[in-house]
Amino acid sequence: MNSNQLTPRQIVEELDKYIIGQDEAKRAVAIALRNRYRRSRLEPEIREDITPKNILMVGPTGVGKTEIARRLAKLVDAPLVKVEATKFTEVGYVGRDVDSMVRDLVETSLRLVKERMGKDVEIVAEQNAQERILDALVDKEKGEKKADVNPIEALLGPVRKPDEPPEVRENRKKQRERLRMELMCGSLEGEIIEIEVEDTATTDTLPGTDVSLGDVFGGLMPKKKKIRKVSVIEARKILKQEEISKLIDMDKATSEAVYKAEEDGILFIDEIDKVAGRSQSGSPDVSREGVQRDILPIVEGCTVNTKYGPVKTDHMLFIAAGAFHVAKVTDLIPELQGRFPVQVNLKPLTEEDFRRILTQPENALIKQYQALMAVDDVELSFTPDALDEMAHIAVEMNDSRENIGARRLHTLIEELLDEVAFSGGENGPEKIEIDGKYVREHLSHTVQQFDVSKQII
């Protein structure tokens, strides 16, 4: 089934492969995603009036807020941009303006479209790159060096060379075919050749915009070229990417990218609670409220000018997230609250959740470390009591100190396997089993540190 036609239940099942618990949040994003597909099947007259139901996720750090949005976008191949609300400032202050999140989304969308289009022209690009490598190999055998590009030739095109005698052309053809066979056999992969590539040095942008000077002058100025000495294997990658860029219809790609951003784009605004006015402070912070008021038109639906043309935000899906430890959701300005009609609360992780996080997801930490150590022929295994002990320590440390959610497991497993990772592979193939006793011995110092820190005033 096409990923765009997944039912909410199937979307939740896909998210379950990577995220433990948080069923309420998964249901909310699954329904929002399915509604996009439902809207796309309607008549244009009614479709225009149906806007996405934006989602506000409330929950402590490390419980899966960002991961849900990231996996959702990957599931349907939709452009996603994650921004921190604290990076933006009110208009007139120093900092990024809120429009930049939309421009970033269009750039992400264009990259996705170019990647897909690139796969369609990949075979032709490989053939063209092969021919350019052969040109470089022929020049190398003849002892010719690539000269720097003449500015006049760059503007008016290369000067036509005189025709070669028939016997020279025949010899060159035979030489080329011989090199082609050697190239296909892989015997020339390490050869160093000179290739002419486009200079991709970054150009300055105009103040307050994402438009570079090159974009302003368009095709008036020729693209800068430079000579690089690289191996054949590296030249193949560089030239293939260049040829793909030449074969892609950029007008079509840009048009499709803008449409994809407008209709399928997901903007994830994290740390939204940090720009909420705190009720106990008497009056809201002017700068914080200013950021909210700047974000409001984007969420409500407006047109943002980008270097690819105007982009409408009316049908983009906005997912905001925050811990709301100090501020409350009601501290957000009422207009912004109203633009996030779906509010879901993510629960703190339990000991059972930690245990499942260690083993169940497809990208589980235990599986990652087992794969890493297998490179050095070390077979790593964990007993059930080891997993129980790690989950118990993670909960204990989160309760006694700052609660950082599932990220606590990264800290624990790195410390637990420090010696294994350091000496792994020194003694040849071996099997290492981690049990509860091993976990207690190696993590007891960390737990004691946390116990002592509670007593320090």
Image (spheres, grey):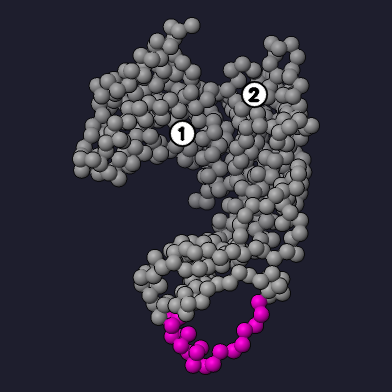
* Image coordinates for residue 209, horizontal then vertical, percent: 74, 45
* Image coordinates for residue 195, horizontal then vertical, percent: 53, 68
Residue in the foreground of this view, choosing between 312 and 393 = 393
Residue occupying the point 39% across, 65% down: 190
SS state under label 2:
helix
Residue in the foreground of this view, choosing between 268 and 171 = 171
Q: Residue furthest right?
A: 92
SS state under label 1:
loop
Reading the image, the residue beneath label 2 is: 274
Question: What span is in magenta?
Answer: 158-177
Which picture quadrant has residue 291?
A: top right
Residue in the foreground of this view, choosing between 173 and 431 = 173
**Viewed as shown, does residue 217 lie left or right of 108?**
right
Label 1 neighbourhood size at 10 Å, few (<14), some (14-19), many (20+)? many
- Give the alpha-carbon distance from disc 1 to disc 2, as whole Å: 25 Å
Q: Is residue 351 highlighted in magenta? A: no
Reading the image, the residue beneath label 1 is: 19
